[in-house]
Amino acid sequence: GESVGLHLPTLSVQEGDNSIINCAYSNSASDYFIWYKQESGKGPQFIIDIRSNMDKRQGQRVTVLLNKTVKHLSLQIAATQPGDSAVYFCAEKWDTGRRALTFGSGTRLQVQP
Amino acid sequence: EADIYQTPRYLVIGTGKKITLECSQTMGHDKMYWYQQDPGMELHLIHYSYGVNSTEKGDLSSESTVSRIRTEHFPLTLESARPSHTSQYLCASSEWGGETQYFGPGTRLLVL
């Protein structure tokens, strides 16, 4: 399944499928991007990050892809598990001016057993 | 798992009361942040600090105030709580040279 971010805030996938969560970021000057997972009643938890001089980075079962041309970021989760059910946020850091992270609106991932 | 703590986890309080939300981290991080988040919505930065005696306002205007007297402690205070302050408040910290922010569990505030 695939999410288009703001236009589809909930993504529902079957257990074992791959998930793709998309994020359109706002500032072409952003030099750092990060994905967080937030489970109900908890604070956001770091998943993976990527710098603007890269276009792909892999972690354990997760991959982040960065397309600077269209200012698009995606998070791919392989073999999605029920424990992956959460809200996923992307965040960007601008390289000038503002020195903190700017968060997107989030996508809820629901994994069906 | 990050060592950042917030108390209380839940708070129900009447209008006009003064409240302080506590945030502490044991990682020695210089940078600390407060975010406000409504359920299922994005995080909005309301305050941040780059070290002791340094505090700045964030993107979202907030009637709250913060202080940073010690590196590990970054409390947020509301002098007179109102129902519009009902939200979740998340504290985070990061190393001086790093961008990755580590979050606490949050405080859910309900003002009646």
Image (cartoon, grey):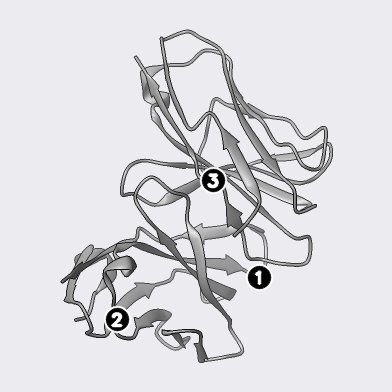
Give coordinates of residue B5: x percent, y percent: 61, 42
Which residue bears the numbered disc 1?
A95
Rounded to the nearest angstrom, the CA distance separating label 3 from label 2 is 29 Å
Tell me the quadrant of the picture where the C terminus of chain A can be found.
bottom left
Q: Residues within 10 Å of mark 1 (few under 14, many from 20)?
A: some
Q: Residue at x 58, y 15 (%)?
A: B79
Viewer-closest of A98 and A43: A43
Picture quadrant of residue A23? bottom left
Q: Is residue B61 above or below residue A112?
A: above
Rounded to the nearest angstrom, the CA distance separating label 1 from label 3 is 16 Å
What's the amino acid at mark 2?
Ile
Q: Label 1 marks which chain's residue?
A: A
Which residue bears the numbered disc 2?
A20
Give coordinates of residue B90: x percent, y percent: 52, 43
Q: Secondary structure at mark 2?
A: strand
Residue B11 visible somewhere in the drawing: yes
What's the amino acid at mark 3?
Asp
Q: Label 3 marks which chain's residue?
A: B
Q: Label 2 marks which chain's residue?
A: A
Give coordinates of residue B60: x percent, y percent: 50, 41
Which residue bears the numbered disc 3?
B59
Q: Is residue A15 above or below residue B63?
A: below
Viewer-closest of A27 and A41: A41
Tell me the quadrant of the picture where the N terminus of chain A can be found.
bottom left
Q: Compare marks 1 and 2 and give the one earlier in the sequence.
A: 2
Q: Residues within 10 Å of mark 3 (few under 14, many from 20)?
A: some
Rounded to the nearest angstrom, the CA distance separating label 1 from label 2 is 27 Å
Asked whether disc 3 touches disc 2, contact meaning CB atoms under 8 Å apart, the reply is: no
